[in-house]
Image (cartoon, helix red, strand yellow):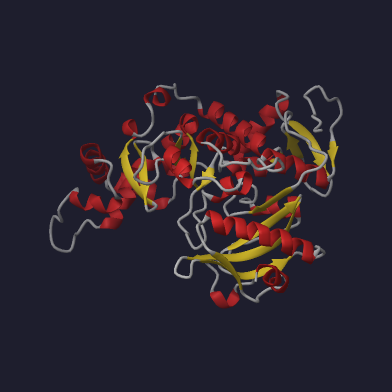
Amino acid sequence: MATRITPQTKTVPKLSLAAARRIALAAQGFGRPRPAKAPSVGRIAALVGQLGALQLDSVNVFSRAHYMPVFSRLGPYDRARLDRIAGHGLGRIDRRLVEYWAHEASLIPVELHPLFRWRMADVDREAWGSISRIARDQPELVAETLELVAEQGPIRARDTGAVRQPPQPGHMWNWHEGKVALENLFFTGRVGAARRVNFERLYDTIERVVPDAIRAVPTPDPEDAQRELVRIAARALGVATETDIGDYFRLPRAASKARVAELVASGELLPVEVKGWAVEAYLWPEARRPRRLHARALLSPFDSLIWFRQRTERLFDFHYRIEIYTPAAKRVYGYYVLPFLLGETLVARVDLKADRQQDALLVQGAFAEDGVDCPHVARELAAELQLVAAWLGLERVVVARRGDLAGALAAIID
């Protein structure tokens, strides 16, 4: 039975690290049994609403990043159902999610889109250099790109080559400039992602992407929008530091501090002490506080439970860095490494690759954390690997003998 802390609590609560972990895991959708049958579109959408965002990433060596958080929490599901509400693929769209720069490039519930209008309006400070610079340096190019989208959308980035002909030899307007112009329009909210086909974004005018009822929502003051984003982040995290909360939707640090302080003053966030944390934490008052929690999941590197690495280390004593951009000879664990959650802790990590030619999920390395029960972890990890392989449509799991957990894992799977 879960207990709750309410705003009427008179003293500053003190939480053990284990209690903070359970609160965080429950807030992120872990700890309840996975559904016995494939979850519905509504169940998938509700989960995304609980999390606030699914981060997108182009790396596809194992599985697209946005697919995995749903599997990690709900188990095997029909990815076409997520595609349908996100507008991915060529099938019917039931628009419940849209893309925007939330944490990074993310799928967000469509009703959150107006909460990012302050970011759209502040492109010079919020966007990276080339995205803001092109509107100053080549405003006519951005205007012509918007006209092209309005006339021909949805379009791919490569279609922008038709916007203008090179005025003279040596001054070709190339694909890259077209992509940058589209990204400026996307960032400023004038175009949206109508679809993704083979993960390539198709751009269209925002009027043809975001439903009329959402676009008609009055633009909130930036402070009000940021305050609501802090509420969503705090609820999704359960218990968190100010930097954890601010990072969730990448708020400017000054704004994050101010909005958190306002919610503390109003009683919507409760200061707490978490044992072992050197900084103050804040509890969402309605957060579930399970006394016990059991979860089993492989976690994408871009899962919202672990995407802020400082929090991952503070919460789980788990040092984690993605090594995609590390030269192969210098990688410690591998190219695409997923932490393995078991019970209430991160107990192992595995380097995974989906090899379609071999029809196999390749476990290129398996590593146990210090002090774990390796035989037990190997059995649970083997079961989860076989489950995810079947979900990906792969016939078998193949374990390479790299890492201190690989031998025990291979003995079970082979």
Q: Is residue 315 left or right of residue 256?
A: right
Q: Nearer the viewer, residue 40 or 177?
A: 40
Quadrant holding the C terminus: bottom right
| Residue 260 placement: quadrant | top right
Q: Is residue 3 left or right of residue 114?
A: right
Residue found 56% across the figure and 42% down from its top: 38
Q: How many marks?
A: 0
Could one spot residue 194 in this view of the protein? yes
| Rendered location of residue 408, percent (x, y) | 73, 71
The residue depicted at 39 percent of the width and 26 percent of the height is 215
In the rendered image, residue 358, in percent from the top left (x then y), is placed at 48, 70
- At x 24% / y 50%, what residue is drawn? 160
Q: Say which residue appears at 85% left-offset and 44% top-offset.
A: 16
Relative depth, front residue between 126 and 341: 341
Residue 240 seen in render: no
Where in the figure is residue 233, as x and y percent of width and height? 62, 37
